[in-house]
Amino acid sequence: MTFREWCKDVWDKSVESFRGGDTNFKLATSLGYGVMWGIIPLWGYQTVITLGTSHLLRLNKIVAFVGSLISLPPFVPFIVFGCYWTGCKVMGHQLLFSLGSISLKDLGSSMVEYLVGSCIVAVLAGLAVMLLTWGILALFRRASDNDLYL
């Protein structure tokens, strides 16, 4: 199988996962689950954990994988700062740096705030993406007989 054939096969399976088979709820849950694991700070293992656990939970692995790609490099500064900000607000601490002056040294000194905030942001973002996706799919995609309704 050539690389081009492999890419076409992956694309066809991805499109097929939205056409039928999975319920709107399962697709929305898969995307939200992927977003949650994409924000959790387990750098380098997010994709493996997302695919492995979504397989165990019988979620759509392709959709969960796409959701975990929220941690692509252009989004990382915003995710890191958002998690740090959330952690500081929850723990009642002062912000030590801003989005424009973020550095690894500053982040290292505020690791507890970042870890607490990232867990909170990951769960909330995953739930928000799941509910938003479920609503959009309910509007634009025909529900199957065994689907949950809003």
Image (cartoon, rainbow, N blue to C red):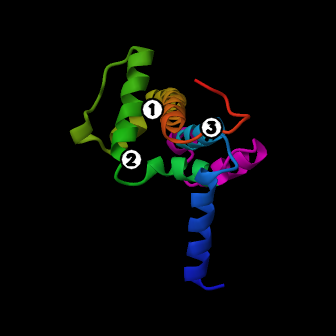
Is 146 displayed left or right of 47 in the figure?
right
Q: To which residue does mark 3 refer?
A: 143
At a point 39% along the width and 22% down the height, the residue shown is 88
The amino acid pointed to by label 1 is Tyr
Tags 2 and 1 in contact by the CB under 8 Å rule? no
Q: Main secondary structure of the magenta part?
A: helix
Quadrant occupied by the C terminus:
top right
**Residue 53 painted magenta:** yes
Q: Position of residue 139 (x, y in %)?
A: 49, 34
Q: Can residue 45 be seen in the rendering of this structure? A: no
Residue 17 lies in quadrant = bottom right
Q: Position of residue 125 (x, y in %)?
A: 48, 32
- State the mark number for residue 39: none
The amino acid pointed to by label 3 is Ala
The amino acid pointed to by label 2 is Val
Q: Magenta segment range?
A: 36-61
| 2 or 1: mark nearer the eye | 2
Q: Is residue 5 above or below residue 112?
A: below
Q: Can residue 91 be seen in the rendering of this structure? A: yes
At a point 56% along the width and 38% down the height, the residue shown is 32
Q: To which residue does mark 2 refer?
A: 76
Front-lying residue, 71 or 104? 71
- State the mark number for residue 114: 1
Give the spatial CA distance, label 1 vs label 3.
Answer: 39 Å
SS at badge 3: loop
